[in-house]
Amino acid sequence: MRGPRRMLARKMWNYAGLAVLVTLAGLAVAPLLHILYLVALKGGEAIARIGLRRFLTESPHPFDPSDPGGIGPALLGTLELAALTAAGATLIALPAAVLISELRGSRLSRATLLLALTLVEFPTILVGLTVYAVLVDHLVGRYNMLAGAAALAIVVLPYLVVQASEALRQVPEGVREAAYSMGAPRTTTVYALIAPAARRGILVGLLIGLARAAGETAPLLFTIGGAYEGYHLCLLREGGAVPLMIYQFIQMPYQAARELAWGAALVLMLIVVTVMVAARLIVREVRM
Amino acid sequence: MDRRLQRILGLGGLRSKDDERFVLLHLPASLLLLLVILSMLAVFTAYSIPILRREGLHVFTDSAWQAVEGAPSREWYGLAPAIFGSLYTSVIAVLLAAPLAVSLAVVLEELTPPRLRGALAMLTDLMAATPTIIYGLWGLAYLAPHMYPVLAWLSRHLSWLPFFSKHPVSGYTIATAGVLLAVMSTPYAAAVIRESYSMIPYSIREAAYAIGATRFEAIRILLGMVKPSIVAGLALAFARAIGETVAVSLVVGNGYTITPSVTDSGVTVSSLIASQFGNAGFYHYMTSALFVGGLVIFAIGLAVNLAAVWYMRKWEEGMGIARA
């Protein structure tokens, strides 16, 4: 059993096994690389034909093959939604995360964390339907940007709670003891010392939450209505957003609409990549 | 603060007024999370009542989808094909994602040279962060057309298997949706597996090598130790796949039938909601039927999620890893 042939067989198995692992891992990553390539190619072509400035500022003309226009209003809508989502979600997520990490061990802390973990993987389309029922169907009576922001905030909120509570937990106990020994109240200690010490972790969570808010489509399907003509920032009116525009325009049987969708996809991908790179830089600093 | 309230919240250590103020100040944030979940449940219950009152449990078991404008008495909605399609595409996705996610996690933790590790980790992060609509766009424009010849070949040569019994009409099929979902959910499962794989003490690796294990044998031993996290990671991937909407609705083909053949077009609950909800206002019961569909994936998602959280926690306790 311990002869050299047995050893050879094990060596062969070793190389075969490692080769399979590496191949499968490559297969897992390959689609992303192809997506990046295809979006850059098709989106790049569309934007080059229309012109970058016009593409980023004009309203779309999905039926006009000679002049498709641009994604201006949708882009503004996405920025508006992302800003509102970030503000709203942070205001609620930070205290919830503080509660989870400060009162750790208590039933309240565990229950709050469980609520967040349950919400974090919730189907986003269901969040959209709920907000539709409350804000569109009952309170406002028409599709509106506020409903979109609320839906996105609910999607991002639990993620932010989990991230921020993990970051807060990393802060050394000594910081808290030092503050208490000087007689600082608990709330002051947390917000003046512990939260700033965990700011990088919290910021990374916020950035990734922002990337999600910019890219989510399903929560917007039945909330913002998808209006792409003309600029406005009114929260109680229909509006547009880049991901929703891609979803609607790619299903239209018009060449111009598809070009707009691919160009919009490139813009969206660039936003996401930028945010991810920024997050990565912050995390690397933490390690050093 | 009231003693009884303190006991319910499990806050034994509150002694000073300062601590009490702190809790009262932060309690609303926690209550708001609870309120979000409760209001979702309330909305779904309220909107589901009309169709449940009219059709009873038939709404879950029938396969007809009759939308008749202006004649509510002739409307009839059965969600069986959509529920079946949601489960079927998600199961395919998890089966395909399992080997991909495990390999990705192991390669990242074990086989990637340190210089490449950052880049590969960044790529997997980007996979998770890429918006689902971008995956949908890729599925619509590239994956589905390129899946068609493969599926046609399979149905020609393996048509005795029920999975490939139908000749595909186009690339927009259950199989395409399953593959796309697998691609999308792999990074999430891989992240869970990676995290617990990296928590294995180094001494165990040393022990494996000390008794002469090859690299692959050592990996198999270590993977055996993180088996629960593989299950938990795949459960999260399943929950993610069953809730996914826009990408699936662009590639699944929207055929309203129950079929074991993955080369046929299908429908999922969320793709049905995406395609029908906009027009549902023209009919009397359709909105309600779609909310019931939402309730079904709500329940499945919640069950799978809670099971995964519970499973992970039990395992962490077993490993003696303290978690606050």
Image: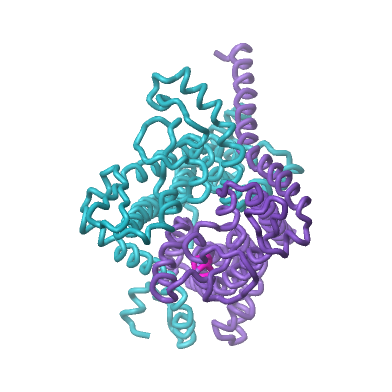
| Chain A colour in the picture | purple
Position above or below: A240 against B293: below
Query: Percent from the top left, x then y, of residue A286?
Result: 71, 61
Position above or below: A36 against A142: above
Q: Can residue B310 be seen in this view?
A: no
Going 63% across and 80% down the picture, which residue do you hit? A192
| Rendering quarter of residue A207 | bottom right
Q: Which chain is cyan?
A: B
Going 61% across and 40% down the picture, which residue do you hit? B141
Position above or below: A255 against B110: below
Query: Percent from the top left, x then y, of residue B177?
Result: 49, 40
- In depth, the one of B257 and A256 nearer the eye is A256
Going 47% across and 46% down the picture, which residue do you hit? B241
- In depth, the one of A1 and A65 nearer the eye is A65
Badge count:
0
The C terminus of chain A appears in which quarter of the rendering? bottom right
Horizontally, is B24 left or right of B72 in the view? Answer: right
The range drawn in magenta is A148-152
Going 61% across and 49% down the picture, which residue do you hit? B134
Taking the magenta stretch, the answer to whether it contains residue A150 is yes
Horizontally, is B140 left or right of B255 in the view? Answer: right
Taking the magenta stretch, the answer to whether it contains residue B293 is no
- In depth, the one of A172 and A50 nearer the eye is A50
Predominant SS of the magenta segment: helix
